[in-house]
Each structure stands twice: as structure tokens, then as C-alpha cells.
Amino acid sequence: MTKETAMAQQDFTKGAAYMDGRYMPVGQAAIPVLDAGYRRSDVTYDVVGVRNGAFFRLDDHIRRFRASMRSLRMQTEESDEQIAAILNRLVAMAGLRDAYVSMECLRGAPPPGMTRHPANCRSYLVCLAIPWISVASEEMMRRGMHLIVSRVRRIPTESVDPTVKNFHWGDLTQSLFEAQDAGA
């Protein structure tokens, strides 16, 4: 059985993923627990929407993603053109017309015997395409939503550059629970 035949027999209905050179159903994608991307939130990402089969400003999203990688001293083996091709392929593999498409650069684990300094860790690309998800339900968008101004402060910009998309979401998560508790 060829690699293409084996891939064609897999179920991509819940989404498709690309991890460090390999394509797979999104449910099979897994981050090693020793990677700095998991252990230290040493990761950057960008998300681009697909509506009616068309990406929204894909080149701009990839450009911003690349700038975030540079800021964190990360790089992938894939070029911007290759990233665009990967994202297009994932959407096609999953058969999606409306999709949430993420590109992520994670720092891996250091080689055995090396320190955990980030310079010793190889970065790699993870991408996924899943059916569109929204922060609000269809009903909420029709009738409107209640909002609050959270008392939880964001991480200071002197600590984490807000122009570099990251997984430091502890403050946002606390704010979401605060809003829910307030009935918003």
C-alpha cells in the first residue's frame, strides 16, 4: 500500500493536521510532553479563517506568523509558500468550506545531554484545519450578547509582546470564568 493510498483511507471528517512533515487526521496529532512548546508555552501561532472555500488574507496571516517566529527566534524548515500549500491541502483533505485553520511553531525538546536553553531546541511546524468554530453561538449572534469589563489584568506588555501571538491565556481564561459567573 502506498503512502497516498494509506492516507486516503483515513478519516479526515473532523479535520486534518500537519506535524513536522507528516499529514494525519486531527485526532491523531499529539505534542510530545517534553517539548518546550507544551511544557513552557514556547510557541507562537496564527489563525486564518476560511469562508465559502476561500482563505481570508492568507498571505497577511503567514507574514504575521513569520514575524512572530522571528521575534521568538524560531524558524521552520517550511517556506511561506510551503506553509500556504500545506494549509490549502489540509482544508482540501478535510473537505471543508468553512474552516478554522491554525499554523503553529513549537519549540521542541533539547537533545539528550543538552541544557533546556531554547537555543538547543529545534522548532517545528504544526498546522490544522477543522470545521469553523466561533466564540459565540448562532443564537448569541442573532440576539446579542452580554459583556463585562473584566477585573483580571492582562499580562503586561513589558513581559509578553502582545503583537506576538502566544498561548499565554491564563488571564483570558480567568476573565471568561468571571464573565460566566456574572451572567454575561
Image: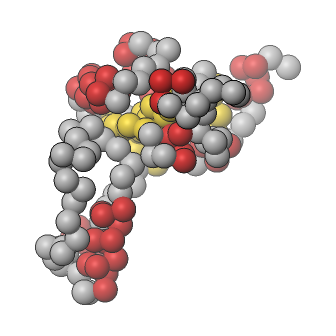
The answer to whether residue 49 shows anywhere in this view is no
Residue 136, compared with residue 47, is above or below; it is below
Residue shown at 14% from the left, 73% from the top:
149
* Relative vertical location of residue 1 with respect to residue 175 in this rendering, above or below: above
Q: Give x and y (percent) for residue 105.
A: 45, 31
Residue 155 vs 183, above or below: the answer is: above
- The quadrant in which the C terminus is found is bottom left
Q: What percent of the width, then of the height, locates residue 27? A: 64, 47
Provide residue 112's location: percent of width, then percent of height.
Answer: 70, 28
Q: Residue at x 59, y 39 (%)?
A: 35
- Count of numbered tags: 0
Q: Is residue 100 left or right of residue 159?
A: right
- Name, please, the residue furthest toward the left: 149
Query: Relative to 171, is 150 on the left or the right?
Result: left
- Can you see residue 172? yes
Which one is nearer the viewer's eye here, 46 or 14?
46
